[in-house]
Image (cartoon, rainbow, N blue to C red):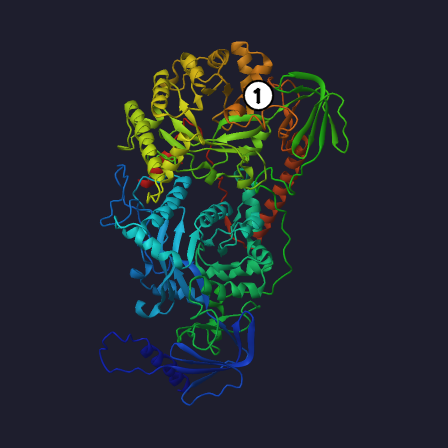
Amino acid sequence: MKKILLSLVLIFPVTLLFAQQTYPVNGSYDVRQGTYAFTNANIVVSANQTIPNGTLLIKGQTIQSVGTATSIPKGYVVIDLKGKFIYPSLIDAFTSYGLPEPTRTSSGRQSIFTSTKKGAYGWNEAIRPETKAHTFFAADSKKADDLRKAGFGSVNAINRDGIARGTSVAVTLSDEKENSTIINPQSATNYSFSKGTSQNDYPTSLMGAIALLRQTYYDAQWYSKQKDEYNISLEEFNKQQNIPQIFEAEGWQNILRANKIAQEFGKQYIIKSNGDEYQRIDAVKATGASLIIPVNFIKAYDVEDTVENRNISLAQMKAWEMAPTNPAVLEKAGIKFSLTTYGLETPKDFWANIRTALENGLTQKQALLSLTEIPAGMIGIADKVGTLEKGKLANFIITSDSLFKKENIIEENWVQGKRFIWFKKDEADLKDTASKAVAKTTEIPKKETVGALIFPFTAFGNATPLKQESILLKNATVWTNEKEGILQNADVLLENGKIKAVGKNLNAGNAKVIDATGKHVTPGIVDEHSHIAGTGGINEGAQSVSSEVRIADIINSEDVNIYRQLAGGVTTSQILHGSANPIGGQSQLIKLRWGKLPEELKFAGADGFIKFALGENVKQSNFGTGARFPVTRMGVEQTFVDEFTRAKEYKAELAKKGNTVRRDLELDAIVEILDNKRFITCHSYVQSEINMLMHVADSLGFKINTFTHILEGYKVADKMKARGINASTFSDWWAYKMEVAEAIPYNGKIMHNVGITTAFNSDDAEMARRLNQEAGKAVLYGGVPEEEAFKFVTLNPAKMLHIDNKVGSLKAGKDADVVVWSDNPLSVYAKAEKTFVDGIAYWDIDRDAQTRNAQQAERKRLIQKMKDSKDKGGKTQRPKAEQKHMYHCETLEEYSMELNEREGTHDHE
């Protein structure tokens, strides 16, 4: 009978407490508050303070006192917790709790350029800062119960839809009405690189998403200083700049990309990541960002089928093993982070995965901090929850033992002073219930040994960074590409990343000597037209002009094609935007520094370039995507005229003192062209269109640097020569579409004979591995002298890219970008044995063989480890090959995929 009365005392007053003051009461009005004294408990006030044999007093939803020898006021219900523990309830800073799943409405394959949302909102539906989660948050009793059982008492609910997503709401997991559970209605403003359910065509790519967000920041700055336009989206965007900023960025490279935006606009994001920071921890730490990291560790792959095993990459295997070390790696690095349940199949998996993190080095103290105080601070509720202190909400859990200790059970979770109970001392039959499984822990074993990191974190990565050395290449046939020509039995000395000397009988000094007798030594190959090392789409094709987007924003240093092309002697590549629109995005020149970070790949001090395009790809009349202008070749011409006319007007307005011109990233790039600070590489085929663009350039006062592809260049070579335009073409591509019906394999030879600086490019990840052989075709088809032919892929493209003062030939003072070939480099039998970039042998044919053997052994070890995990009852997943795109100008699949996904189809996956 006493137990029944106690239960009534515990439940009845708390229920009355939550009656909202502004709500009418149907019946007697009773406002009694629950008053409780929890005695003899081990009270974990915070990760840094524990009170043994302490007393916790709560009244209603508030903590009244925490301490020892506390006097218990009259009327308090005393609950003896001898031997038990009290912890602050846990906090999750990144959930979608209580919010509907975003849904996309079909547009019927009709192009949508500006928002269809009614009202004075911004032009692009992916920018939706006016979205406020607290206005449509609805408590979910089932999900709340699952989270409470895992020990959580409050969460941050985020609307995961769009690039600028609006504000999130911090709520408790009480089962009362939303009026009582919302504790911070605007806990953070939120961002991502995903356009979400937006029906706007733009953006179709990662670089487009980045450009759109950057432009929004600039628009918001302009908006705050003008009075001509009212814009709800920009108004709300500005209002939200002084609250916490959470950026969902999946993958460490996206963390770096998000941080670049933060630096540009003086922000410091809290970044929700996907848990792979261990792969580049130094770079992540350098951002200074706090992180929200998941514990949805990768399930082992079912490796019983040896055929399916081939679908699993080394990176996938190593990520399975190493992902659980991520929290410990972050802790060791001193990075502030919280832990989230986001991404778990069910909150029931949470404690098992926390357990795995502890086994892999995460400390209990850090785990508690990352589940209480740190997330509370991130979302602006540290004054209410996160620790057990007077005046804070009565959000706490009662556990049978230390939270992370063997056999511990979360017995109760009190949220805003309301009791939720799953385990009672006198109900032994509950010990095997699901609630115990949720809090399952065992003694922490010795930290598990895992394999070594490799850089990059993919096949052919290196366990230690490659070092720059002083190298003397002796007794080789040296192709200088200088006035000295091809030298026999000559030496090349590399020192401090530069070519120190070229000649005979050079003094080695302290340099490492490599006998190159019978070998050929050349400058590294320069690819004027490449699409490797990009991520998230190589085209931003939704608009006819996308000069605001930058390949620089999406460089992917983990692309295995970098390594493969080093094996073909390539050392420098211009990474171009695709050919989906007349004026495409800004290019990025990179050196193939395998294992370096994205920023470290960039060719320092190089001029800026931009991709233009002509022909079938840009007018898209056969693409079936709707009415994006232009759809004719006449429209393409008008696009150029309009854009440069606007840019001239924009430039003139900017020059006026005290101007209030809105900064336009699109026009900024065009003004750079007019000012000879950015240079055009134009995709082209047909004589008539090449002529058209030359005339437009003449009339509007800009220059064309290079026509790329230009398979009818032989028809207009004299006109190009007169204007100083370069030609980067294919060696012998023809007849693959109507635009190249009149292409001939003598094109390169003819343009070269006219005096045009002529190059052969790849436009294809596979062809780039054999550009030396492409150069050989100039000898085959046109009788070009061998030395001149090899310049088609070395010195000539270097001249086009304005970097011939650094690369393209072997000359003292130039960068030590050098290749050692087994044979004449124009021969199909020649192999690149060593490829140096800045004096570092990023490719070495002998080291490659050793790497392959070592990584094969590593695969075998990991396969056995996954088998052992399965035998012990670990969860598994079926092997699935990683999806990777290889782009070139004649494939617009990345744009087409986006359009198909918008309609719910996946024809191009």
Residue lying at the far front in this picture: please name it.
657
Q: Residue 656 sits in which quadrant?
A: top left
Residue 796 appears in the rendering: yes
Residue 153 is situated, as x and y percent measured from the top left of the image, at 42, 68
- Viewer-side residue, 498 vs 135: 498
Please state, as top left, top right, bottom left or bottom right, where the C terminus lies in the image: top left
Amino acid bearing label 1: Asn
Q: Residue 686 sits in which quadrant?
A: top left
Residue 176 appears in the rendering: no
Q: Secondary structure at mark 1?
A: helix
Above or below, comparing residue 722 to residue 287 in the picture: above
- Viewer-side residue, 814 vs 207: 814
Above or below, comparing residue 627 to residue 705 in the picture: below
Q: Is residue 233 left or right of residue 57?
A: left
Q: Is residue 561 left or right of residue 99?
A: right
The residue depicted at 54 percent of the width and 28 percent of the height is 803
The residue depicted at 42 percent of the width and 37 percent of the height is 537
Residue 307 is situated, as x and y percent measured from the top left of the image, at 54, 37
Report crowding for label 1: few under 14, some 14 to 19, many 20 or more residues within 10 A (C-alpha). Answer: many
